[in-house]
Structures are given as C-alpha cells and as structure tokens.
Amino acid sequence: QVQLVESGGGSVQAGGSLRLSCAASGVTYGDYCMGWFQQVPGKERETVAGINTVDDSTAYADSVKGRFTISQDNAKHTLYLEMNNLKAEDTAMYYCAAYRVTSSGPCFLIEHYYDYWGQGTQVTVSS
C-alpha cells in the first residue's frame, strides 16, 4: 500500500526559503512519477512540479520556474521541494502525490493522473 507523508511546511517571510519533504512507502522507486501540488481554500488544487523516478526528468508550473526545485533521494524514498524566493501567493497547503509509470520522460502535471496522495503540509508566506 502506497503511503505519502509530507513535512517541512511552516511560516516564512516573503523572500525566504523552505524545503518540503515527502516520505514514500509502498513505492518502488523507478516506477512512479512523483509530484507536488498546492491548494488554497476555495480554489482547485494546482500543480507545482513533478519528477519521474525512472530518469529524474522534471517539469514545473510556470509560476514556480526558477524559484522551486523538485528532487528525490532514491535511497531514502523521499521526495523534496526546495522553495526559494517565496511570495505571499505561494501560501497554500502543499500535497505530495504519485502515479505509476512504465517509461521515462516528464511527468504529466495534471491532477487526475495521480492516484496516491499525502495529507498535506501548510506553507504560509507573509509579506
């Protein structure tokens, strides 16, 4: 059974940095696309970034390119999201998610592809 547990959220001033982590169990690294999503109350969940554990190919939403970096540690079965130069509009609940893949290449940054979800970790950026 796949389980995803996020951590690392918190409160930070605009311009600051945070690193989110997602510990994955029940996942055979090398077989999944892993992604980060954000959701603000009353709005739909939006993609932030994805990484294919087959070949480490990455994809990002335009709003975070150059500021956020997604990465993974195969040995630790952990997904990361390094967030720099944070803005007030980055305030959201951040979710880790995964779906099974059989090939290399960038992950789909579309919510309905993802079958497994964590509970989320809150990020609050004050201006």
Image (cartoon, grey):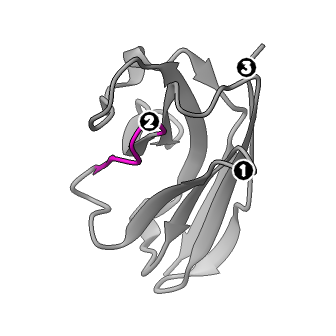
Q: Quadrant of residue 63?
A: bottom left
Asked if the residues shown at circle 3 and circle 1 are in contact, with their CB atoms under 8 angstroms apart, the answer is no
Q: Residue at 42%, 44% (x, y): give it.
A: 51
At label 2, the amino acid type is Val
Foreground of the two, 90 or 8: 8
| Mark 1, residue position | 75
Q: Mark 2 or mark 3: name the one nearer the start of the chain.
A: 3
Residue 103 in the image: x percent, y percent? 34, 23
| Mark 2, residue position | 54
Other-residue count near label 1 (Cα within 10 Å), few / some / many at <14 / 14–19 / ≥20: few
At label 1, the amino acid type is Ala
Q: Residue at 30%, 29% (x, y): give it.
A: 108
The residue segment tinted magenta is 53-60
Q: Residue at 52%, 25% (x, y): give it.
A: 31
Q: Quadrant of residue 18?
A: bottom right
> Element type at marker 2?
loop
Farthest residue to the left: give it: 62
Q: Mark 2 to mark 3: distance in Å?
A: 17 Å
> Element type at marker 3?
loop
| Mark in front: 2 vs 3 | 2
Q: Residue at 37%, 40% (x, y): give it.
A: 47
Q: Is residue 33 above or below residue 39?
A: above
| Mark 3, residue position | 2
- Provide the major secondary structure of the magenta segment: loop
Foreground of the two, 103 or 20: 103
| Mark in front: 3 vs 1 | 1
Foreground of the two, 65 or 78: 78
Asked if the residues shown at circle 2 and circle 3 are in contact, with their CB atoms under 8 angstroms apart, the answer is no
Q: Mark 3 to mark 1: distance in Å?
A: 17 Å
> Element type at marker 1?
loop
At label 3, the amino acid type is Val
Q: Is residue 59 left or right of residue 127?
A: left
